[in-house]
Image (tube, coloured by chain):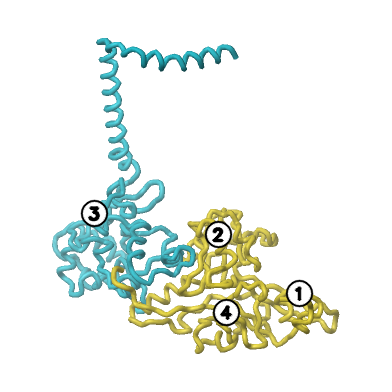
Amino acid sequence: MSAVDDKVTDLTQNPADDAGESPHPPSESEETTGGSILLFFILGLAASMVIGWVIFPKLLYSEKKQPINFNHALHVSEVDDECESCHFFREDGSFSGIPKNEQCIDCHEEVNGESEDEAIFVEEYIAKDREVPWLVYSRQPDCVFFSHSAHVNGADMECAECHGHIGESEKSRVYEENRISGYSRDIWGKNIAGFKRNSWDRMKMDDCAECHAEADGHDSSVQTQKDACFVCHK
Amino acid sequence: MKQAQKEHTTKRYGMVIDLDKCTGCGSCMVACMSENNVPFKTDESNKLDSITWMQVYKLTNGKSYPNTEICYLPRPCQHCAGKHEGHSPCVSVCPATATDYSKETGIVSQIYTRCFGCRYCMGACPYHARYFNWWDPVWPEGMEKYLSPDVSPRMRGIVEKCSFCFHRYQLARNKVYLEGRKDLDEDEYQTACTQACPAGAIKFGDLYNPEHEVHRIAQPDMQHGGRPQNPHVFRLLERLGTNTKVYYMSERRWVRKAGDNYLPGEFENPGAVAGSH
């Protein structure tokens, strides 16, 4: 008990001492210690930044190659109806998504041109009647309901607003899959900090909600006075 | 999305179940479970542990032979509106905004990814329409491939319930958008139980729409909390003020009486018993 009391009195006395006289000028050895601490701090900060911004994202996402390197630009120039030539709506309003062999076979029954990917496609998939196991960059988690019809037909949105200018791409980029969640990197976005410049940079819930909050008539929820969760969740 | 979406009118989806037609076969329960990926176990005898969005109850008039009568009562979620729209017992208590009331359709939703399993809503629901997942679902081998992709399966630790097959509404609306129409037709959106009932005992549609069969049968008085004006139609626990959207119909008096708790003589002579209502 008495030891504690001593400490308390010591502590209360010290500030008074310091205030009374100016502190000693720092000696040379103290200066170098301070410098090395600062250096150590800067190095540590730099190292953790590199780990957080560069190494962690590399570890978090596995990189997968598409089975075929697809040239969107070439196909768009060959068809009449832009995106909807291949990615169309079915009669019941559902969206066909990525085309099946059935749609490709008219042009690709035989190998056209000299591209290696073309040869693989025709020989490995069309000839063997196998569907191409495309990796879908924009695949949403299981709990999400998304209606292409509501957005494209109902709200007159352009494909590029969410998918970017993928129609102008000449080759398929690498598909990055989150090792923890299994979702495509396009959902979180390329920028690990979550910054986005274009409307298609990210496909998280907040990005959907941004538009839903702006548009009129989206207030069906009693709880939130916004769009009800059920509009997009299943 | 920046442009204002094409307006569509407000709906109050509801159901009328003709108890005199119901044979208690359980088709609605089976259809519901397969439509909505409802998990089941090898031993379903423990009713505290089993999940049935649609549950068929058996009622008797309590008389001995030869006067015994049986009635089967299918019970989905009643999609209560409450005293004012959205004042459903479950919606008003949910601390997680996991259950919500849609002003557009009148449907009480349950968002599984939002629910954290406090079960407050289960305590609040007077109809026992909500179920808790005590376990992760385990499907018989190979069955996982046959699950419906339109309804996401639930994990353990969360509450689930009937959604009036809301995914069917969503899918039906796809076509409405494509064709540039404003509204769904009555037959474009029907629940799985409605379509599965071999006796045609379940009718489903918009209670606001006078052309829909549910409106014609129940004749709901929307000025007075949707009270049915057809004398053979009643709702479960009407006097709680839950303003449910599932109506029941029976010619039999004792069945209609079973829909609520009455003091002796109160049902026969409403108003005569002091303190009633």
Spatial CA span between label 3 and label 2: 37 Å
Q: Nearer the viewer, mark 4 or mark 3?
A: 3
Q: Residue under circle 3?
A: A197
Which of the labelled discs sits on residue B275, or is there none?
Answer: 1
Decide which of tag 1 and tag 4 comes sooner along the chain.
Answer: 4
Q: Residue under circle 4?
A: B15
Query: Who's the residue at 54% across and 53% down the image?
Result: B116
Q: Nearer the viewer, mark 1 or mark 2?
A: 1
Q: Using the rendered image, report if marks 1 and 3 lie on a common chain.
A: no
Q: Quadrant of residue A187?
A: bottom left
Residue B55 in the image, given as x and y percentages of width and height:
64, 70
Q: Are marks 4 and 2 in contact (CB under 8 Å)?
A: no
Pick the residue in front: B86 or A51.
Answer: B86
Secondary structure under tag 3 reads loop
Q: Are marks 4 and 3 in contact (CB under 8 Å)?
A: no
Q: Which chain appears yellow?
A: B
Q: Nearer the viewer, mark 1 or mark 4?
A: 1
Q: Nearer the viewer, mark 1 or mark 3?
A: 1
User: Which amino acid type is marked by label 3?
Assistant: Arg
Q: Using the rendered image, report if marks 4 and 3 lie on a common chain.
A: no
User: Which amino acid type is marked by label 4?
Assistant: Met
Q: Residue under circle 2?
A: B94
> Is B64 placed left or right of B87 in the picture?
right
> Is A80 placed left or right of B26 in the picture?
left
Residue A105 in the image, given as x and y percentages of width and height:
25, 71
Q: Which chain appears cyan?
A: A
Residue A88 in the image, given as x and y percentages of width and height:
29, 73
